[in-house]
Each structure stands twice: as structure tokens, then as C-alpha cells.
Image (tube, rainbow, N blue to C red):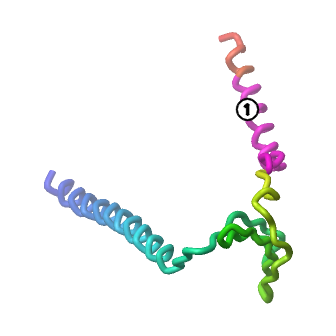
Amino acid sequence: MIRIFGTIIPLMLALFAVVAVIYLSYVFSKYVALGASKMSGTKYMRVVDRMMLGQDKMMIIVQIGESYYLTGVTSQNVQIIKELSGDELIEMEAAVPSATFQQVMSFKSALQKHLNKKDNEPK
């Protein structure tokens, strides 16, 4: 009996230590993220939207005051492509489901068929 408690107590302490480390990591990461957002300190401009074009290439829409700029960004260059007005920004509809999403849906339908077949089998 004493032997069981001798092994459970260190196990419980280790479990408590792991939970404490995870919680402290969570609190610390929130603190670091808050500090990073304060350090960026952008008062006059913001990134409205971005689209990745390749590994190190993207297009970004930046708002500065009332103006919007379409910029191209690569690892070696940042270039303003066009100045946009607020009227030119039209929110796009959601993209067509990707092949992965379609595979998940087809897997889901196949699983559902299998489960329905099992439910309909005589017992």
C-alpha cells in the first residue's frame, strides 16, 4: 500500500509540473505577442490583405490614410504596383473548395455509406 502511494505522489507532482509549464508557456506567449504588436506600433498604415504567389513572393494591399496601395513583395524587392481607391476594393467570394477539401468530403460520404450499410444489416 505504501509502495503505491510512493509511486503515485511523484507521478502527480510530475503531472502538476507539466500542466504548470504548459500554462506558463501560454501566458508568456500571450505576453510576447502583445509586446510584439506594440513594438510594430503602426498608427498610420495597415495591411488590408495579402496573397502568397510563391515561396518568397506575395502581393499586399496596404492602407495609408485614405489611400490603398497594391504592392509586390519579393525577398529582394518591394514595389508599388498601383494606387487603389476604396471603391476598387471588392470583397471576393470564398474560394472553390480545394482538392483536399473535396477528398475529405468524399471520405465523409464513403464513411457515411459504410455506417448506413452496417446499420441496415440484419442482426
Q: Amino acid at mark 1?
A: Leu
Residue at the top extreme? 122
Residue shown at 26% from the left, 58% from the top = 12
Q: Is residue 94 magenta?
A: yes
The residue range painted magenta reads 92-115
List x then y, in percent, for residue 29. 44, 70
Residue at the left extreme? 2
Above or below, 72 against 107 in this view is below
List x then y, in percent, for residue 42. 56, 76
Residue shown at 41% from the left, 65% from the top = 26
The reply, left or right, for residue 104 in relation to residue 25 is right
List x then y, in percent, for residue 38. 47, 75
The reply, left or right, for residue 40 in relation to residue 105 is left
Q: Is residue 68 magenta?
A: no
Q: Quadrant of residue 14?
A: bottom left
Front residue of 29/99: it is 29
For label 1, count other residues whose C-alpha is less than 10 Å away and answer few (under 14), some (14-19) or many (20+).
few
Mark 1 element type: helix
The reply, left or right, for residue 33 in relation to residue 77 is left
Front residue of 25/78: it is 78
Q: Quadrant of residue 79?
A: bottom right
Q: Quadrant of the C terminus?
A: top right
Residue shown at 74% from the left, 68% from the top = 68
Q: How many marks?
A: 1
The residue carrying mark 1 is 111
Q: Quadrant of residue 87?
A: bottom right
Residue shown at 85% from the left, 73% from the top = 82
Front residue of 29/4: it is 29
Residue at the front extreme? 66
Q: Main secondary structure of the magenta part?
A: helix
